[in-house]
Amino acid sequence: MHHHGRCGHGHPGMGFGHYGRRHAGGNFRVPVNVSKTDNSYEIYVIAPDRVKEDFKINLKGNELTISYQAVNDDENKNWIRNEFRKASFERSFWIDETVDTANIKAEYQKGILQVTLPIIPGSEQPTQEIFVA
């Protein structure tokens, strides 16, 4: 089951929405950090102990979706305590025409998936200061 919601706005180039995907045991929402440099937006998905080949990054229109389909090999273990689950997840981000979609890159290191969204040079609107009379 998917539910779709926008949760706030970031810079003009990116809005932050999400898809929640329900699994047995509740709704898992992976932590995401987003930063902006002079040349790009950087998305950091905190997802330790994953297989990098199982991440999927898709762009459809203005919606960038990052997902992971977990293979649940933990269910056969007789856990006394189990606080860490390698659950599947899906997160979506809204991008606009300032992002160079042909050159989006992703890298998975030390438990963090970093997705780089280059900004097309000169495409951002300059900040306009409004004079207060």
Image (cartoon, rainbow, N blue to C red):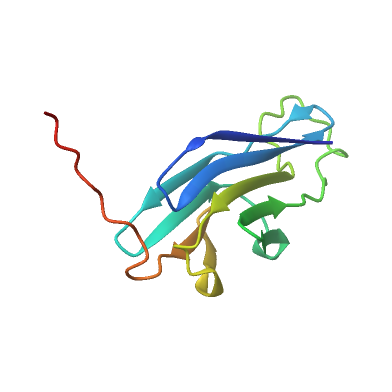
The total number of labels drawn is 0
Which image quarter holds the N terminus?
top right
Q: Is residue 48 at all visible to an observer of this figure?
A: no
On screen, residue 127 versus residue 30, left or right, reads: left
From the top left corner, tell me how far across and down residue 68 is, in percent. Answer: 71, 52
Of the 4 image quadrants, the one containing the C terminus is top left
Rendered location of residue 24, percent (x, y): 84, 31
In the image, residue 54 above or below residue 29? below
User: As rendered, which of 132 and 118 lies closer to the eye?
Assistant: 132
**Is residue 93 found left or right of 44 in the rendered image?**
right
Residue at 40 percent across and 65 percent down: it is: 119
Which residue shows up at 40% across the image and 46% down it? 11
Residue 79 visible at all: yes
Q: Residue at x 34, y 71 (%)?
A: 121
Q: Going by the image, does 71 lie left or right of 104?
A: right
Which residue is at the front of the view, 114 or 104? 104
Viewer-nearest residue: 31 or 75: 31
Q: Position of residue 132 (x, y in %)?
A: 14, 30
Q: Residue extending furthest bottom?
A: 102
Q: Furthest residue to the front? A: 133
Q: Residue at x 44, y 47 (%)?
A: 34
98 lies above or below 94:
below
Drawn side of residue 98 relative to residue 73, left or right:
left
Location of residue 101 (image quadrant): bottom right
Q: Nearer the viewer, residue 82 or 121?
A: 121
Q: Position of residue 106 (x, y in %)?
A: 54, 65
Q: Which residue in the rendered view is the most extreme toward the right?
A: 76
